[in-house]
Image (cartoon, helix red, strand yellow):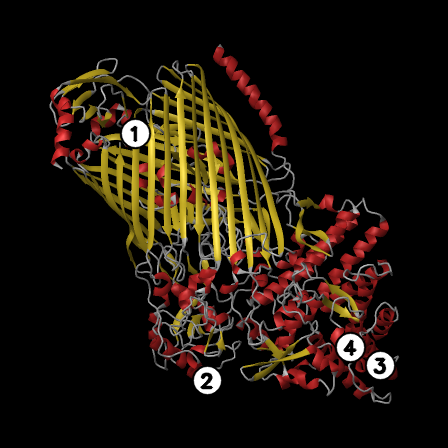
Amino acid sequence: MNRLRFLIVILSLPLYSIAQTISGNVRDIEGTALRGVTVGMSGRHNETMTDSLGYYRIVVDDLKGQLYFTAADMERMVISIAGRTQLDVYMRAKVNNLDEVRVIGYGTTTQRNSVGSVARISAEEIANQPVSNPLLALQGRVAGLSVSATSGLPGATVKIQLRGQNTMNPNLAQNDPFDTPLFIIDGVPFAPQNSNINQFLSAVSPNSADNPYGGISPFNNIPPESIESIEVLRDADATAIYGSRGGNGVILITTKKGLPGKTRVGANVRSGFSFVGPTMPMMNTQEYLEMRREVYINDGIDPTLSPSSSAFAADLLVFDSAAYTDWKRYFLGNTANNTNINTTISGGSASTRFMIASNYSNETFIYPGNFNSSRIGFQGNVNHKSADDRFSVNVSSFFTSNNNNVPGSPDIIDAHKRMPNYPNPINQNGDLVWEFNGLPFNAILNNPVAYLRHLYQLGSTTLNSHAEINLRPHKNLIFKTALGYNLTIIDEYKGLPEEAQNPSNFRRRSATFGRGESNGWIVEPQFHYSSKFGKLQLSALIGASIQSNNSSSIAINASEYTSDALIKSISAAAETTASDNYNQYRYSAVFGRLNAIWDGKYILNGNIRRDGSSRFGPGQRFGNFGSVAAGWIFTEERWTNERIPTLSFGKLRASWGVTGSDATSPYQYISRWSLTGFPYNGTVGYQPANLFNPDLGWASTQKLEVGLELGFLRDRIMLTSAWFQNLTGNQLISYDLPSQTGFNNIAMNLNAVVQNSGWEFTLNAGLIRKELFSWTSNFNLSIPNNRLMAFDGLESSAYATRYVIGQPLSIVHGFEYEGVDKETGFFNFKNVNGEKTQQPVLPQGGIMNDFVPISTPDPILYGGVGNTFSFKGLALNVFFEFRKQNGRNYLAQVYSSVVGRQYNLPKTFVDRWRKPGDESNFQRVTTQGGSSTTASSFVRSSGVYSDASYIRLKNVSLSYNLPSHFYQKLFMDNVSVSCSAQNLLTFDNYLGNDPETQSFYAVPPLKTITFSLQMSF
Amino acid sequence: MNVIKIFTIFCLGLMFALQSCESFIDISVPRNEITSEDLFSDSTNADAALIGLYVGLAQGTTDVLTGGGMTLLTGLVSDELVPLNTSIIYEEFYFNDISRDNHVNSTSWRAAYSLIYSANACIEGLEASQGISESARNTLLAEARYLRSFVYFYLLQVYGNVPLVISTDYRLNKLLPQTPSDVIYEQIIQDLEFAQSHFPKARNNPNRANYYTATALLAKVQLFVGNYASAVEESSKVIESDMFNLEPHPKDVFVANSSETIWSILPLTTFSQTSEGLTFIPASPTTLPRYVLNEDLLYSFEANDARRTSWVMETTVNGETYTYPNKYRVGYVTEDSGRENYVVIRLAELFLIRAEAKMSSEQMNDLKGAIDDLNVIRKRAGLTELSSTLTHNSVRELIQKERRVELAFEWGNRWMDLQRWGIISEVLQHSKPQWNPSRIWFPIPQNELDINPNLK
């Protein structure tokens, strides 16, 4: 040991004793030389400054230390010398929020000069959050953007909607309306309608009443760590340049790019765990069996062992009345692990920059067994600029491969409603048990562990490439061509081994193999012109876009396997049948923009776009869209500075425009027949594929917005308030039809207008900015309002008992709940005459009967509050998300099964009605089911809607930048450690497990705690 | 100047791009699809549209009327089947308390109209087609109209009266109210008569509709609407055609290619069984049957009736004996299980139709003819022949009994018979304590009522 230390001293002696000179050039990232930058050595007192060419020379006594570079308008940089004597440095301009670059459609702007409504989420805000889906990182962060998880399971889809529901529900079932924002990643449209990428069902995509929206998200292939910024474009000014597809807003995702300068290597390792946390407990065996015995007394019947009878009672007659398993704990009580590693190498010179990055992540499931969702990705980009600045090119690309290994049966979701005295589902050999004391299990007694043995795998691979070639024939002109290509391949497998099947059915081993491919390209030539004429700053854009997307999917059903071990292979199946699906989408547009700024005070912006879409028939394909917007920076007027000196920035802006939507399935304008998957008598046939509508055309949204942006105390406090109104007409929907027409719906335009209006407020404040301590705070609040303004022929339409003019689209009609009758013990409702009844009448023939409006589950207000405190190297980030809303409570799902049959109930049901005179919220337990029961009226009543507001501690993260002396000798630039927690606490009055997913059985958003280590060299 | 030049070139380029836009976004239909226009442009393609209808029929499960639902669902609501080991949703059928949101009921409604749409689309496509020869077109039209009437006939039997949809125009069809059943019967008879007169008499393919299937169904419909003379005439056309023979023993009636079969639907794949076989046959000797026979039905079989042993199977589970329908023997197709087709109509039923029509027709009052036809069926079942001197009433009772046994759990004949004989309440309140005479039809599903305000 001593000898080693001696050796180090000897080796480092010359460095300590001999003075060394380091020199180099300091430039900004665009390559412009920076003059007057202070250069110094950390921990020493020698400093110098760059000259007019950005050149510096500094004498140091140690080539192992660090150099710092500071300048008034640049961000401070610290670089390890690492033995070098030549150090060129590229510094980033220090910007306040006002002048930070914001990406907009076909260009960039700043908040100062923007007359549109654009919000930006930076890489730092995303990095704090240990989430694997980038959409989840937006929760509560952007005014006007509503983001909700469909399930806490890894890979699950995230619902997203900007500024309310623009489109009526495509049908009366609970399907999502087609009004998801347009996603563009590095200029390439991605994941239209945020549609699920899976073809088959699994625990993540149950497609059941317990979780109707679930699915596997296309965004699993976008690692959050690869994102530099996410811009959310909201109003007409920002979205009209996307014409027909901007109607529902636009979300631009920009991936990280290389920075010039020293080659930097960064690594981030994160690891942690997730759990469900406390949810509503279920009854134990004693409480459950007491309830079950009461059922038979209530109904005056005897328990039987006839499995088809509603009086079937295996739990009372056969199962051990002393056995107890907490199935919720069994299935959901585990801890899931996650690991995330990513590395980056970036660097380059003023003319050429590059970055390459890789990422890996793995998350396990809370279900018992080996389930996981993992991702591996690579990302790279190169920018090159010619010396004379007349030519530049930048190319970026990422490749991600994602693999999900999920429990295959959706039924796993409500497995924990098994009776608490259900016998051990697994025997000593690990095999599933299908009978107990001679009683074979039927569907009601199905072994819940079998659901975990249904196999499901989904692998998806995404390649997204983008290139931009810029030619500058004249100093004011840029001819730019943007090219993009996107390829997504999905491989899916679902297997049903014999061991997972009940032997009292015919057990048929089967498997389904699915493959989906979607590839698209986009070419967008553009002409940018900008010039200054005196006080007038003028810029113009004219361009065109052509785009093509082909997608296809294949599903192969394979069966007649001879063993469970073979069911992952197609060739081992004695029988296979296949089906396929193809669709093509083509799109073309020409667009233009004119922007004029007079004297830095008055801003005028206009957009125009003409679009053609292959989704519509001849004659309906083209549509014109556009916007005008104006802004006035009144703090540039002399009088404001004099009268309101605390006001450092003030802008009034307004925009109006028309955007549209072509969000409908392809080929709906033509009558098609598709091949039958099977031959009959040796011949393959055709079956009608659709009802067609040759008049199908664009939906259009008129958007109006007025905004006021204020900066106080030299822009330390920035407040943005906006009022908007969107009117979506010519509703493009899938209209519900009675089955007698042969189909359940038809794509059509409906002469109805939906209005979304509201207020949005965003506040960013640097409350304390001291050398050692700082406190910044941000806040956003949205107050939305949704209304159906007009609907021609509503009374005679399929929506007659669904929508009301003047009311939100989310309005729910149902019976008015009047509590449990003390004498009979059944639910009471109020009928149309105001009398109590247990037999309320459903709507029929367009007449509401006893139905009244009972809820509007849209949020009343929502937003987020974040605070960041930093002290020396320590930073604490606390972010709350909040939402005030009404929603469906747990009773809706509990009463969808017959409360009293062989299902366990939440422990709250201990307080049910038991005898005349009892006051309770839960009616008498019974085996009686069907549509004429009070329970079936109850699930359509105000009793299943209640407050679902919440405040959630979405994220808290604590990070610590280690002092440089800890790692200097390892030639590192920066080392930090951090700990983050997601969804740690929720404050709510919600009746049920989770007010966000509002499902009693679906897995709620998990609580995740992670620890991470970041290093850069 | 340079700027203007570049700008002009770019704008010209854009103009050119705009011109080519129109054709750029003109896409063709996916490669596994075809437009209506192309489909009916020649007879091979048009034939594929008809094939699609058969695939639709063959895809039906026991939740679909024409896929086994007539047997299962009406077997439960009438006095044939009792649920034992199945989902509780079928209990609603057994208790004659089918709720409007019973999803089995809504599936059966939806599936029927989906088939009707396909038939209507074929009929419209064929009628508008230019590229098919007159005779080929008429044969295909006959087939489509036959299939349409076939679906309507069964739809009518469970819902009482239904909207009569005979076009593909959704704007018109979406608001159609129910049509009185006699109007629908008129349409059915028109379709069948058209089919009968345009099908060639040669029977090329026993698994597709042909002259004999149309004639057999016409005989059945005529019996149901009370045109007994026509029923006798039509059933004789089939019986006397010498195309079909009764199998000597009941056990061979439902095997593939039985000589008794007038029309059967083929399974879709080599490993598919009939939906009835899959539903009724227990998976293993220790599995309870899903449905067992109603005791009344069991007692209807006379002693020594060969049909009792051929078509009803017994199984003993945990010491208890259960009986279940076993006209189809294959519950699960394996390499060596053999194959079965789903028999829609067979010769024996035509004898029973003719017997009943002969007995019921006041003009004919051909009791002897009726007894002869009945004896053909009884003889095959190994029963004694009836004497030719029976009274009108006892012949009627014997026909009722014979129909009950010969056509037991087969295409809902029992349910339809109880309805048309007007004895449904009388019989069912006797055998089913929970029978409610106000519920003699399946309810129209709630989601249909929600969307079409003209339905009741």
Secondary structure at numbered mark 1: strand
* Residue indicated by mark 3: B370
Discs 3 and 1 carry the same chain letter: no
Crowding at dot 2, Cα within 10 Å, few <14 / some 14-19 / many 20+, comes out as: few
* Residue indicated by mark 4: B249
* Residue A886 in the figure: left or right of residue B119: left
Separation of residues labelled 2 and 4 (CA atoms): 49 Å
- The amino acid type of the residue labelled 4 equals His
In the rendered structure, are the residues bearing label 2 and label 1 in contact, judged by CB atoms less than 8 Å apart?
no
Question: Against B225, is B11 above or below?
Answer: above
Chain containing the residue with disc 2: A
- The quadrant of the image that shows the C terminus of chain A is top left
- The amino acid type of the residue labelled 1 equals Arg
In the rendered structure, are the residues bearing label 3 and label 1 in contact, judged by CB atoms less than 8 Å apart?
no
Separation of residues labelled 3 and 1 (CA atoms): 100 Å
Q: Nearer the viewer, mark 3 or mark 4?
A: 4
* Residue A418 in the figure: left or right of residue A730: left
Separation of residues labelled 2 and 1 (CA atoms): 78 Å
In the rendered structure, are the residues bearing label 2 and label 4 in contact, judged by CB atoms less than 8 Å apart?
no
Secondary structure at numbered mark 4: loop
Q: Residue A846: image x %, image y %?
A: 56, 61
Crowding at dot 4, Cα within 10 Å, few <14 / some 14-19 / many 20+, comes out as: some
- The amino acid type of the residue labelled 3 equals Ala
Residue A300, numbered circle: 2
Chain containing the residue with disc 4: B
Question: Against B246, is A767 above or below?
Answer: above
Inspect this view and state whether residue A530 appears: yes
* Residue indicated by mark 1: A264
| Residue sticking out furthest to the top | B1
**Figure quadrant of residue A317:** bottom left
**Figure quadrant of residue B95:** bottom right
Discs 3 and 2 carry the same chain letter: no
